[in-house]
Amino acid sequence: MQPNGGRPGGESRPGGDGGTESSDGAGAARDASSDRASGSDDRPTPATLADATAADGEAVLADLIDAGAVDAGGDDVALAADFGRRWQAEIETLREAEPADLAAATLAAAPAASAVETTTDRDRTYVVLSEGADEPAGEVWIRRPVAVAETAAARALGATTDLAPARRAVAAHGLSVFLDSCPVCNADLAERKAGGCCGPPRTDAEGHPLRALVCPDCRTQFAAFE
């Protein structure tokens, strides 16, 4: 993976390879629980670090600019070179980490969660964050590539900025728009219609299909664009 210094930094919403579009953890958990309860799709609904915090995500770009993680000039937004190198180093560390170590690092980056485990479902590995109550509605399932990318970003933000932990978690997901390759399988990412492997594409409030940054090899979705 190499963070892309020139990708536009538009607002992104949480998403996996069929993840929910939600700005808070409670919404993502409710959607995931509802999907499993209704029997419409028995696979877990992937989420992001932003789903595991109650912090407001609307000001994420301003946070990243103020923190020096991204540079803004006119209409262009680019990843700051120094921050990009720090993020890349953290990605390389977490990519090689044992599952338990990645889970612990992800939990540390999600201040609203109090428990974590790793699990595999249909050959896909997830880091599962929760409040420790063993209730599906309180769980946030994060695909391993997303956990690597966003936990690495949160760690880099923690080392280089004074952003509060909850805001770092939201900002870490916002930084996903700057990825140009998958942090785990290293395939080049592509912009495609947002959504899962089956069913209709995700849409905005006006019914227009959303575009998403997706790994074509492991089918992980990192960010959806408004």
Image (tube, rainbow, N blue to C red):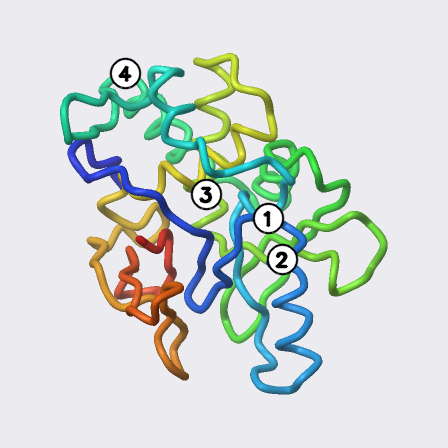
| Real-space Cα separation, disc 3 to disc 1, in angstroms | 20 Å
Q: Give the residue number, with chain letter if any, for mark 3.
A: 148
CB atoms of marks 1 and 2 within 8 Å:
yes
Which circle, 3 or 1, is nearer the viewer? Answer: 1
Which mark, residue 24? 1
| Real-space Cα separation, disc 4 to disc 3, in angstroms | 19 Å
Q: Give the residue number, with chain letter if any, for mark 4.
A: 82
Q: Amino acid at mark 3?
A: Val
Which circle, 4 or 1, is nearer the viewer? Answer: 1
Q: Residues within 10 Å of mark 3 (few under 14, many from 20)?
A: many
Q: Classify residue 143 as left or right of residue 174.
A: right
| Real-space Cα separation, disc 2 to disc 4, in angstroms | 34 Å
Extreme-bottom residue of the structure: 39
How many callouts does the rendering have?
A: 4
| Real-space Cα separation, disc 3 to disc 2, in angstroms | 23 Å
Q: Residues within 10 Å of mark 2 (few under 14, many from 20)?
A: some
Callout 2 secondary element: helix
Among the two numbered marks 4 and 3 on one chain, the one whose residue lies closer to the N terminus? 4
User: Residue at image x 21%, y 59%?
Assistant: 191
Q: Residues within 10 Å of mark 4 (few under 14, many from 20)?
A: few
